[in-house]
Amino acid sequence: MGASTLIPRVRISRAAVFGVFGLNGFLCSMWVVHIPVITQRTEVSKSTLGLLILLVALGGIAGMQAAGPLADRFGSRTLVAVAGTWISLAVLGPAFATGPLTLAVALLLFGTGNGALDVSMNAQAVQVERAYPRPIMSAFHAMFSCGGLAGSLVGAATMHRGWDIRITMTAAGAIGLLMLALCIPRLLPRGESDSGATTSIEDSAEPPGVRRSASLRVLALAAIAFGFLLTEGVANDWSALQARDHLGVSDATAALAFGAFSTTMTAGRFTADRVSARFGRVAVVRWGAVLAAVGLALVVSSIWLVPTLLGWALLGIGLAGGVPQIFSAAGNLGTRSAATDMSRVFGLGYLGFLAGPSVIGWLADLGSLTAALIFPLVLILVCAASARIVAPSS
């Protein structure tokens, strides 16, 4: 494939990856918005539901770790096809579950497929970005958010019309399979480079020392991903409650805190690529983390609603571009195991996303929820100081 025909092909592949990211967000959201219905159908308690949701996380981590080596061996396009099909079918599981045991199996399978798709689609995104003339990674993550919004709207509409959840989820799964049929043939095949040539992992051996250096960078990138995603998890789970308890506002008004955060994060992901193209990956991570810290500092110190909402909005903008740049850096370390490297960064980052809300809850019991937010504030400042690690490998 010549250079003259590569860019149109890559543009088509970019659109296909957008579709896969949007599909992932859509299917995840369809499960989340139906949690109350599923809980009622299966007659599980809130405490049991909490344990069952943990299975989604455990399955996700397992799927991530399995998908990395498999994507390196068979190519990210193949793994996107397998994982996408898996999650499109697995989304039916919770809808057809009849009790705690069947729901547990369904959620474990759903989480595993979701984790595998996370890694494989991001590995494909890195491959497409490598062949593209400018950074595009953050926009892929923005499409995940858009897919999630679409899923929440579709779920709300079908529940409002009284659709049986089994019909809704079957339709969602069918949409997933149709979207995959459209997108998979348009993804880049294994080993295709920006020059249109194909390479194989067996073509050349890694120079001595490359693997060790890359492993150290993977750990460093994973640590920064942990900090960013922990802070994001805290905002997702605690922003509205913090606004209500700290400011004494109603639940409806407090919900604006999460709305401010999620809106600016989505918008920020659509613009972060252009910032990265102009100022570089390090600047996006460093100054994004600084802006996030400023936002959290404003939330902690404010006693009025408007500055608090501004603080959560600044946090969303600050965090928006960081994680995509970290994942992009992990996929471009110059090794033959890019997807495996990404899966490790994903795994620790995802652990931070899960652990963050729990840590804040524990700290809030010792003092106050607002004071507990100082922990992610300090952590994100450490990420800012460590941003150089995302610089392109020389």
Image (spheres, rainbow, N blue to C red):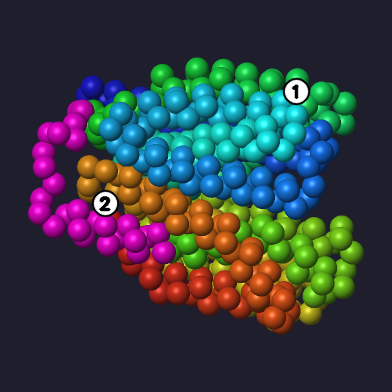
Which image quadrant for residue 73? top left
Magenta segment range? 197-223
Query: Can residue 150 be seen?
Result: no
- Contact (CB < 8 A) between labels 1 and 2? no
Other-residue count near label 1 (Cα within 10 Å), few / some / many at <14 / 14–19 / ≥20:
some
Decide: is 346 above or below 241. Answer: above
Other-residue count near label 2 (Cα within 10 Å), few / some / many at <14 / 14–19 / ≥20:
many
The structure residue drawn at horizontal position 15% and vertical position 34%, both measured from the top left corner, is 202
Residue 333 numbered tag: 2
The structure residue drawn at horizontal position 69% and vertical position 20%, both measured from the top left corner, is 171
Residue 214 among those drawn in magenta: yes
Which image quadrant for residue 319? bottom right
**Which quadrant does the N terminus fall into?**
top left
Residue 23 among those drawn in magenta: no
Which image quadrant for residue 284? bottom left
**Which quadrant does the C terminus fall into?**
bottom left
The structure residue drawn at horizontal position 19% and vertical position 53%, both measured from the top left corner, is 211
The image position of residue 263, as x and y in percent, is 67, 52
Horizontally, residue 8 falls left or right of residue 46, namely left
Determine whether the residue tagged by mark 1 lies in a helix, strand or loop. helix
Residue 166 numbered tag: 1
Decide: is 32 above or below 234. Answer: above
Q: Earlier in the sequence, mark 1 or mark 2?
A: 1
Q: Amino acid at mark 1?
A: Arg
Q: Amino acid at mark 2?
A: Leu
Decide: is 299 above or below 210. Answer: below
